Amino acid sequence: MKVSYKKLWKLLIDRELKKKDLMQMANVSNYTMNRLVNDENVNAETLAKICNALNCGFDDIMDVIK
């Protein structure tokens, strides 16, 4: 199953945040950020951290591509 995090990047732009800001807010590593940038799978716990930091839901930051 393929995922796309384009919604996450748009959300960061809309909120005038940088990837580095998100890394600090959600306490995620550079390795995880690289996986997100490359539309690779990350675990649900990491996605939950990001959603909590941005006060949003999974569907606000990602799409599942069939």
Image (tube, helix red, strand yellow):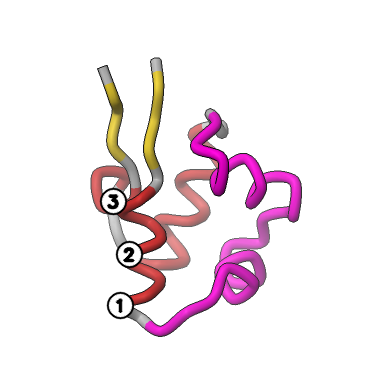
Read off the residue under disc 1: 14
Identify the disc placed on residue 23.
none
The residue shown at (37%, 75%) is 13
Q: Secondary structure at mark 3?
A: loop
In the rendered structure, does residue 50 fall within the stretch colored magenta? no
- Of marks 3 and 1, which one's residue comes earlier in the chain? 1
Rendered view: 13 above or below 4: below
Front tag of 3 and 1 = 1
Q: Position of residue 33 (x, y in %)?
A: 63, 51
Verify CB contact (< 8 Å) between mark 2 and mark 3.
no
* Amino acid type, residue under disc 1 in the picture: Asp
Depth order, front residue of 37/32? 37
The residue shown at (30%, 77%) is 14
- Of marks 2 and 3, which one's residue comes earlier in the chain? 2
Q: CA distance from mark 2 to mark 3?
A: 14 Å
Front tag of 2 and 3 = 2
- 29 vs 39, left or right, is right
Identify the disc placed on residue 10.
2
The residue shown at (47%, 79%) is 17
Within 10 Å of the Cα at label 1, are there few (<14), some (14-19), or many (20+) other Cα atoms?
Answer: few
Identify the disc placed on residue 57.
3
In the rendered structure, does residue 24 fall within the stretch colored magenta? yes
Give the magenta range.
16-40
Q: CA distance from mark 3 to mark 1?
A: 16 Å
Within 10 Å of the Cα at label 3, are there few (<14), some (14-19), or many (20+) other Cα atoms?
Answer: few
Q: Position of residue 30 (x, y in %)?
A: 74, 54
- 12 vs 37, left or right, is left
* Amino acid type, residue under disc 2 in the picture: Lys
Q: Residue 2 lies in what quarter of the image?
A: top left
* Amino acid type, residue under disc 3 in the picture: Gly
